[in-house]
Image: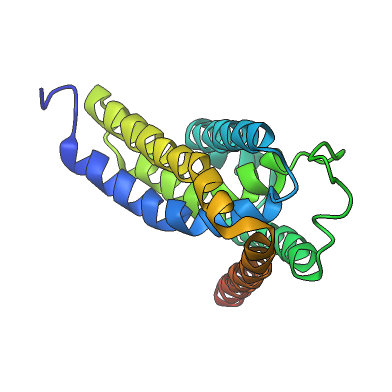
Amino acid sequence: MSNVFDAYLFASVFITLFVIMDPPGVVPIFLGLTGAMTRQQRNRAARQAVLVALGVIVAFALFGQSLLNYMHITLPALQASGGLLLLLIAMELLTGKMEEPQPSGNGKVNVALVPLGTPLLAGPGAIVATMVFVQQSDKTVADWVAIALGVVAVHVSLYLAMRFANVIHRVLGDSGTILVTRIAGLLLAAIAVQLVADAVEAFIKAA
């Protein structure tokens, strides 16, 4: 079995990505972004967000370094851009603008794709961590299976966390959801500022 599966690498990938992508911490932000949606729309958004995040992670795991090198993009630049995008979304959550444009959950911008799928779930941290695991692996079948299973397991955890956010929404009610939305906006703003700060620090060190 050890020839086709590396349990230690699987555990390392799963724990690292679980901490970075933080399924429990995504719940309040997910509720904030989908508060105006129906239960069916929220379930669909959860599926779409997880599939988008999984697609982005897999794409960067396979082709990420080559793509960044080809476009002359550094990892700090990717991190800073993700932070700025999250900051814009956080401002909309804090001011209540996220609820206004799409009262039926059918706005022109699908929040399941941006910012949920990326850069919130498949953000710079998760992308870089996955790329590092791929680069440091021995490129054997056992390593590829372990990395793949670790990535999939984390995304299953993300889906379950967002899928059962409906239960939390029913318990909180509309007023509670609005309160959670404002708190989520504050947390998201802090995450965004930290991403930009880390990127600036990396730029300074590289200079």
- Residue 90 to residue 120: above or below: below
* In the image: residue 102, left or right of residue 205: right
Q: Where's residue 199, x and y in %? A: 61, 68
Q: Could you say which is closer to the camera, residue 163 or residue 109? A: 163
Position above or below: 144 against 65: above
Question: x, y percentage for residue 1?
Answer: 10, 22
Q: Tell me which colouring the rendered structure shows.
A: rainbow
Q: Looking at the picture, how far across and down is residue 27, in whole percent?
A: 53, 54
Residue 62 position, x and y percent, is 49, 31
Q: Residue at x 55, y 76 (%)?
A: 205
Q: Nearer the viewer, residue 170 or 185?
A: 170
Whether residue 104 appears in this view of the structure is yes
Q: How many marks?
A: 0
Q: From the viewer's side, name the closer residue of 122 and 133.
A: 122
**Quarter of the image where one finds residue 118:** top right
Residue 199 vertical position relative to residue 47 in the rendered view, above or below? below
Residue visible at 65% across and 69% down? Answer: 179
Q: Residue at x 60, y 51 (%)?
A: 30
Q: Quadrant of the C terminus?
A: bottom right
Residue 74 visible in the snapshot: no
Give the quadrant of residue 206.
bottom right
